[in-house]
Amino acid sequence: MMNSLSPIWLSYPESFEESAFLAGLQSLFAFDEEREHRFSSFIFDTFDWRIYRKGLRLLYQDGCLELSREGEPLASLSIRFAQQPFFARDLPASELRDRLESLASVRALLPWAGLAIRERLLPILDRNEKMVARVVLQEIRRAGRGRSEAHKLVKIEPLRGYETEAQRLMEYFKAGGFGDSQRDVFEAALEISGVTPGGYNNKLRVQLQADERSDQALSKILRFQLGVMIANQEGIIKDIDSEFLHDFRVAVRRSRSALSLFKQVFAPDSIAPFGKALRELGKQTNLLRDLDVYLLRQTEFQQRVPLDFQKGLNPLFQRLRRDRERAHSEVIRLLTSVSYQQFTTSWRSFLEQTPEERAYSRDGHKPVKKLADKQIYRKYQQIVKAGEGIGRDAEDQQLHRLRIECKKLRYLLEFFYSLYPGEEVDQIIRQLKRLQDNLGLFNDLCMQIEHLSEYGMGLKPGKRLGNLAILAVGSLIGSLYTEKQQCRKKFSGLFEEFRAPENWRQFERLFRRKKEN
Amino acid sequence: MAIRSLALYHLKGGVGKTATAVNLAYCAVRSGLYTLLVDLDPQGSATYYFRVKPKFKKGAGGLVRGGKTLAHNIKASDYTNLDILPADFSFRRLDRNLEERKTPRSRFGKVFQPLLNEYDLVIFDCPPGLTTVSENIFNLVDLLLLPVIPTTLSMHSLEQILGFLKKKKYHSAQVSAFFSMVERRKKLHRAMMLEGEKLPIDVLSSVIPYRSEVERMGLERRPVPEFAPNSSSAHAYLALWEELRRRYGVEK
């Protein structure tokens, strides 16, 4: 529980003469000796600002890491920190760790802004030499070498029971030209560091107009996806966390989807090399992503296996870690290669072309809503038809294909979100997401079972660890297989919900084009 | 099981109640607890040690009536998270005000409940004597802490208190004693401390020695660890606090 008297933040006046001001202050109030205090402060958040988006702040200051909401601390930890990324799981067991794990999940917490703060503490006293308030003169500078501009603030900390004294102090400061400052360390830090909180958002929906040219509309969408790819590059190379690569690949997939769903919006010859490059990017990052997913699941997998066999998974994970390092080096090579740089430059140039500069295409000039309606409706019909053909004995492959079609529909709904009433599309996306989650899980389980079986088949029995490994992998596959069957059973119910009459009526209403005269 | 309130109490004055209350409160905030020290002694020594003006708005009557008066009288000490509820001279009338109530011996329960909820720990510095105020304290706090000088008279006094508590079956969850103002050179002190082991209550193993630093508190007007952090008294108070924490589970 903290003192509920909130500090008063003031900003310095344009021209300020410290010695005169302090002399004036001294004639009204007694002070005790000034103490100086220097410390570092950092703001931490995930690359995608998950903490900030929830209205919270994670600030490290002077040996204390604190999560707060609107100035009220929620959880804190005394700890020594440096200005580098960390994971919630690396913190000592504490409420703060629990909260951060649920907020950040597998993402690293990055130091978005680092400050070097110098505080001069002036205790204000009454005639009994009792402290009645604290005045803190803060100088905030960007952390790092070299002296940068200081951002100055004054903080008056009231003490309980001495509110009138704090009030008088504030009035004295204001009479001296000090102004209210809404800013606190968090905001000052971001401003000094030139950081916009919430600046990265890979889920942003691009604003389109219904009658906009399709080639312009699609260019906007693709430029945004390219931006996401570029934003995530450094995080992949530096290996900060697994989600940089994930977001990168999602942007690649969305780009490829857009191109394949709208084949005639750009001249096929002009777009072909880019489609090919994107396909290559997807392919060359597949392995690293698969390995990342395995390693993220390590604890979960170990827990599925009886205690006595768990050690048997160690050789598997050792190998996966080695393979992962190798795959990561390959991806670094890819992203730092000249051909990749050339791709991003030329792709951007292509997408920035004006309609006059573009080669002729069949559909480029058509209003985007017309094409969007058509594709979305068609995709919905394809999904319903494919889903109907999936009976109890259907092959796994049918579900995998359906999953891909659902993904395409989802991308379409997200690309063209701005063209339709938001609430209704949200509802459709919610339904679709439930189906996708089931198909996604099913696919993951199938892939895992397949890979593990392959691995297991290659193991040699006889040596003790060999036997243990076989038992471990076998029981893991067994556990995954049970889950696969449960997942499969849920499919038909979810599909029925998806294609229920209320849903297809909505699709008709929103996306079916009436015959035009 | 965790303790949220404790009182320093003894029949006699001058046994180290206030010094202990002040220094324990300081140790408590240093270990992270949001703490309130309540001065119930009209002499206002605890209030004086923290340099707070000995003024309680609405006086003894206001305290007994309760409500927002208490919160309005709280003053922050110079130390973060340590607040003081000051005493003033009108507190000599506390007993009289309490006797006017329907339930004179349990009035403090109602009056102090909001503060017990707000703070992690509330420490009461009690006036000497066996009065209605004392009985309210016996009914209210989780732990009654009795400082005892290891002399015959002091131990005798302790036995009187224990007899009284047993007879009246007071609600107070725990009663504990510790030796205060101890001079180990004195054979009498050493002998009395051994006698202490025979007492029917918990006797803490931490002992507060008789030291000049503690007397200097009146001049310094700060807790001992602030002006003499390396002294044996500072260490002794810290050890006492740690022992209390471990034994009685004082925590946030």
Image (cartoon, helix red, strand yellow):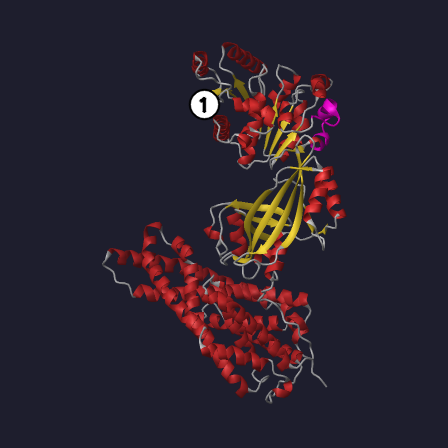
Seen from the viewer's position, the closer of residues A470 and A329 is A329
Vertical side of A179 occupied by A216: above or below = below
Query: Quadrant of residue A266 in the image?
Result: bottom right
Does any portion of residue A388 appear in the rendered image?
Answer: no
Residue type, mark 1 in image: Ser
Residue A506 covered by magenta stretch: no
Q: Which residues are magenta?
A: B54-72
B56 in magenta:
yes
The residue indicated by pointer 1 is B205
| Number of residue marks | 1
**B224 or A365, which is in the foreground?**
B224
Q: Is A61 displayed left or right of A330 in the figure?
A: right
* A19 to the left or right of A67: right
Front position in the image: A114 or B220: B220
Task: Provide the secondary structure element on which disc 1 rests.
Answer: loop
Looking at the picture, how far across and down is residue A97, in whole percent? 51, 49
A421 vs A496, left or right, is: right
Residue B165 in view in this figure = yes
Decide: is A137 above or below B210. Answer: below
